[in-house]
């Protein structure tokens, strides 16, 4: 049943519509305006839960309340990048370059941090890579 996308959507909508407990449904990276046209067809019928849509498309604001997330400040970005990444604080220029390359975006910084940690890279090596 879950191999069929339409059946999977119907099942999820039915289950969430019948739940009396709170739930969260996430649609991540809906940046294509075409994807937003029929998105409400995926929404469950009850109001016991919340729907979170992440998008860089400005038109997504039409779906409901929106929160604009901004870029991180340098000190916040450095803290996120260097926290538990094993990132060498002796490479401050490389750390700042990474933040700049990533546009100071929190998710990108966190992904870079995880990659650096997993690969056990120095910050300068990450920039080269």
Image: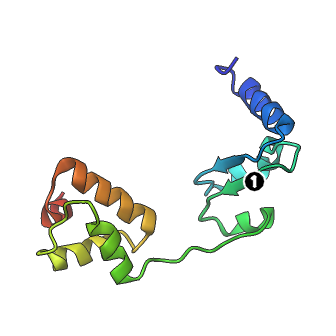
In the image, what residue occupies the spot 39% across and 73% down? 103
Residue extending furthest front?
Answer: 21
Badge 1 element: strand
In the image, what residue occupies the spot 23% across and 56% down? 116
Q: Can residue 33 be seen?
A: no
Q: Is residue 109 left or right of residue 13?
A: left
Task: Tell me residue 71's x, y (percent).
Answer: 47, 77
Relative to the observer, which residue lies in front, 60 or 109? 109
At label 1, counting other C-alpha atoms closer than 10 Å, the crowd grade (few under 14, some 14-19, many 20 or more) is some
Q: Quadrant of the N terminus?
A: top right
Task: Tell me residue 83's x, y (percent).
Answer: 29, 66
Q: Quadrant of residue 43?
A: top right
Q: Quadrant of residue 18?
A: top right
Compared to residue 30, the image places residue 101 above or below, namely below
Task: Tell me residue 6's x, y (percent).
Answer: 75, 27
Disc tally is 1
Q: Which residue does the numbered mark 1 point to in the structure image? A: 50
Task: Tell me residue 51's x, y (percent).
Answer: 73, 53
In the image, what residue occupies the spot 79% across and 32% down? 15
Q: Is residue 79 left or right of residue 70?
A: left
Compared to residue 15, the image places residue 127 above or below, namely below
Residue extending furthest top?
Answer: 1
Q: Quadrant of the C terminus?
A: bottom left
Q: What colouring style does the render use?
A: rainbow
Q: Can residue 123 be seen?
A: yes
Compared to residue 42, the image places residue 67 above or below, namely below
Relative to the observer, which residue lies in front, 86 or 21? 21
Compared to residue 43, the image places residue 84 above or below, namely below
């Amino acid at each position: 049943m879950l191999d069929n996308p339409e059946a999977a959507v119907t099942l999820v909508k039915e289950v969430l519509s019948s739940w009396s407990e709170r739930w969260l449904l996430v649609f991540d990276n809906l940046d294509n305006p075409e994807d937003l046209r029929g998105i409400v067809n995926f929404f469950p019928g009850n109001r016991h839960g919340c729907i979170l849509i992440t998008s860089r498309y400005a038109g997504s604001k039409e779906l409901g309340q929106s929160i604009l997330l901004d870029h991180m400040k340098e000190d916040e970005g450095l803290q996120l990048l260097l926290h538990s990444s094993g990132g060498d604080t002796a490479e401050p220029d490389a750390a700042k370059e990474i933040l700049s390359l990533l546009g100071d975006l929190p998710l990108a910084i966190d992904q870079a941090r995880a990659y650096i940690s997993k690969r056990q890279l120095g910050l300068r090596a990450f920039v080269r890579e």
